[in-house]
Amino acid sequence: MTSTEIHDKVQELVNNFNTERFIYDLLRAYGISKTSITRLQKGDFNLAKNKDEILYKKKLFFKEVESDNLMALVDDYSKDENLKHNPRFIIITNYKEIAAKDTRTNKNLQVSIKDLPKNHTFFLPWAGQEVYTASNENEADRKASYRMAKLYDILIEENPEILENGVRELNLFFSRLLFCFFAEDTDIFPIEGMFTNTLMQHTQKDGSDVHLYLDKLFKALNTKDNSKQASYISQFPYVNGGLFQDVISIPKFNKEARNILEESGELDWSHINPDIFGSMIQAVVNPDQRGNLGMHYTSVPNIMKVIKPLFLDDLYEELEKAKGNSKKLRKLLDRISKLKIFDPACGSGNFLIIAYKELRKLEIEIWQALLETEPQQSFIYSNIQLTQFYGIEIDDFAHEIAKLSLWLAEHQMNKYFENQLELGKSNPILPLKASGNITHANATRVDWEDVCPKHKDDEIYLLGNPPYLGRSLRDTKQQEDMDFVFQGKKNYKDLDYITCWFIKGSNFLKDSNSKLAFVSTNSICQGTQVSLLWPHLLEKKLAIFFAHQSFKWNNNAKGNAGVSVVIIGLSNSFNGSKVLYSDIGYKYVQNISPYLTDSKDLVITNRYSPLSNIPEICLGNAPKDGGALIISDTEFEEYKNNNQILKYIKKYIGANEFIKGNYRYCLWLTDDDIKEAGEINEIAMRLDSCKKMRLNSKKKQTQKLASIPHKFGEIRYKKSSSVIIPSVSSERRNYIPIGFLDKNWIVSNSAFVIYDAEPWLFGIISSNMHMVWVKAVAGRLESRLRYSSQLCYNTFPFPEISKVKKANIEENVYAVLEEREKHPEKTMAELYDPDKMPKGLRQAHKDLDEAVERCYRLQPFQNDTERLEYLFKEYEKMIAKDTLFQPARRGGKQKKTRKKKVK
DNA sequence: CATCCGACATCAG
DNA sequence: CTGATGTCGGATG
């Protein structure tokens, strides 16, 4: 059975939806035999213990519920150890939505029933087809892109002098080349293939005169009257549009380069998306230009994730409502001919192009609906103009490409329009006319309303993928941009550069009928940045009306940026239902919080001392030594028989070492040691290199440390046992592995430490309650959990508990430690891998979780959502109390009084 | 003085 | 070369 057949059967099931038969119809759609299904219905294949459940060996576990919280239930069942017979899928439905988990791949799906056909591939393993990851990207785009990259490399090698005048000429040359390839395949040029064919006929095979030919051609394309030229040149039309205006020096070709031109000409460029230009620049430009501002090209699937919820879904819904009513349909045509699309970081214009194309497609559908009720006599012209599209781009070349690409998109869509509508007609494309309103400027500095005028009742959609730059990656100029945008505001320097776009965007939305949606680094919805940014936006009464939770950035360019992104849609006049998207599907929610979760707008602010009555936590010891004080395994081998050195060496452990079950060594010298130790050659050399590194630092604090190179930069070590908490840990784990260490370990700054901690505290921070909290409020490294003292530990609400309860928690802690000791050969990574976690350890943690939960309330929690809600409430209560009794608190003083109470 | 972060950085397979 | 998963020192409050 093919995938399409399955899709059609699932569609049929949805069309004739019947709750009684649903799950059987679904299995049937995937080719499960009639007899099996009958036996499952009768009961002898159904292994479930409860009446309202179905358990089909190796196939599925199915349950119908009334709740809305489907995914949480699926998760609960998938973790249930009493669930036998290895069902491949766990499926829960309320017959509006369906949630499912593939127990082998751990992939989740949550969609409304009507969207099941679109997602039919999820259950393909039933039909014996393992999940394959189909590429959404256009194969032809990629081929062309790689060819251009290769050509670029050859031309650079053949013309070493070409970059002397900067890359602009070479880039412009490539953009002309791309235009010609496109033009010859899409009747912009009168004869198909005329660019490549003429070039091949009139140049030598060794490529030596290709540059002369191209120079002649490019000049001709910029000349209105070419009648005096030879016919092979004069047959080309006048293009202009600024593209061929400047005279540039054309690079010299060799045989291979000419061959690439020939091969490229053979590709069918008419099928290439004009947005490929963006991708090409990315793949083609000099490697050290890569990753520059505006060079991050957004893939079409990702652009669709923005424009569909932002305006397209809504417009299609209007179309459905208007069908059969000419007046309404005409009104809708009028509406889309007036709305404005504005990308204040447009790069080479990908968002604008896709938005343009989608609106043209929609326009055709409206016309088709209109023609059914109101047959037309005269020709139909499109009313969507390139001038409805606005953009700001800081890079001159990219902004030229954006204009060019919009022309090409217009040409493509004109063809499509004429194909789809019998009466459809368009004006000629050449010579090129007004394109989109693309402004070459710094978006953080210009007034956006100068670029895209905002009149009363204008329907404007802001979209795009502005640049992300964390605190330390900005240059001076960009820092000044932020100072400019955040004038009069405090504490903005830890925010990402992209927040400039959110601030300016939220100002633009004020008193207008506009909405905004940007692709952003997920950092602005995590950790410290949440409390620094979101109050500014929320105070303007803006709401997140849709959002897409974190997903890994990717596009079809050669090297992908390493970042996880979110999509945030903001609106100031929104009364519809809010939609929260994720990789597994979407759900309608009451509210979307700044953390992009289904909860109210609570923002957790970092704290310098614990909110609850628990001891102080601190970061580990930071060497700040350029590696000079750290001793690797192999280096230790050399020293291990040298007692003189050995006495100054301690075991050194950080997050990585603790989780992977190994450790390094470090030099640990006190002021008293320095004289004796300094005479040992190896140590003296290390101290010297540490000193050099510190002196070379830009930072004053580090420079000062150069006077004491024998010591770590930050020392928090105490001669006592400690609890170690890795600062970064994989999000796959159910628990961050936490450990006890004796006084002989130096914990590095990649982990947090609580010195002198009692076992009950270990229990609390290891508990699921704490993990639920951490997952909600912690910063992240991409999507990894990043533990921190200020955000995770100091904010954690935990009640005062009795000695009896402490003792009870401690018993459970010992049980966890015992279970770990049963597997001395296993690392923490292995012990806490959710797929391989030993049963005993899992149980011990479960028992510990329960003991901790009982400190909050006796009635057990149903799921993690309920736990988090409870914790948020407790947090608010404790914060209110905290500020009430200690209005003017300072971190330092508070710490001391707290500490005394604990001891 | 004490971090929390990174259109990342680095290792294993 | 890709997937998995956490270093290290700076800019900042």
Image (tube, coloured by chain):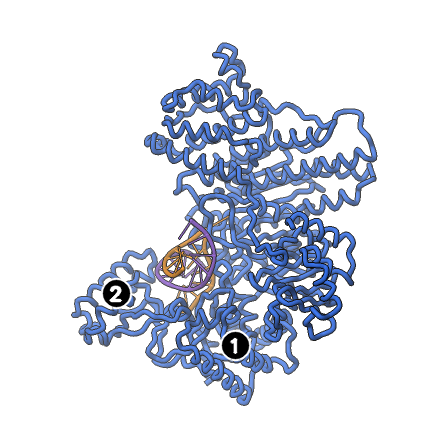
Chain colours: A blue, B orange, C purple
Q: Residue furthest bottom?
A: A804
Q: Nearer the viewer, residue A662 or A784?
A: A662
Q: Considering only vertical position in the picture, is A617 above or below A809?
A: above
Q: Considering only vertical position in the picture, is A250 above or below A810?
A: above
Query: Pointer 2: what residue?
Result: A707
The chain holding disc 2 is A
Image spot of residue A897 (x, y percent): 47, 81
Q: Nearer the viewer, residue A807 or A485?
A: A807
Q: Considering only vertical position in the picture, is A449 above or below A247?
A: below
Q: Nearer the viewer, residue A152 or A755?
A: A152
Q: Nearer the viewer, mark 2 or mark 1?
A: 1
Query: Pointer 1: what residue?
Result: A839
Circle 1: residue type = Lys
Question: Do we see residue A488 in this rendering?
Answer: no
Residue at the spot x=63%, y=73% of the render? A870
The chain holding disc 1 is A
SS for dot 1: helix
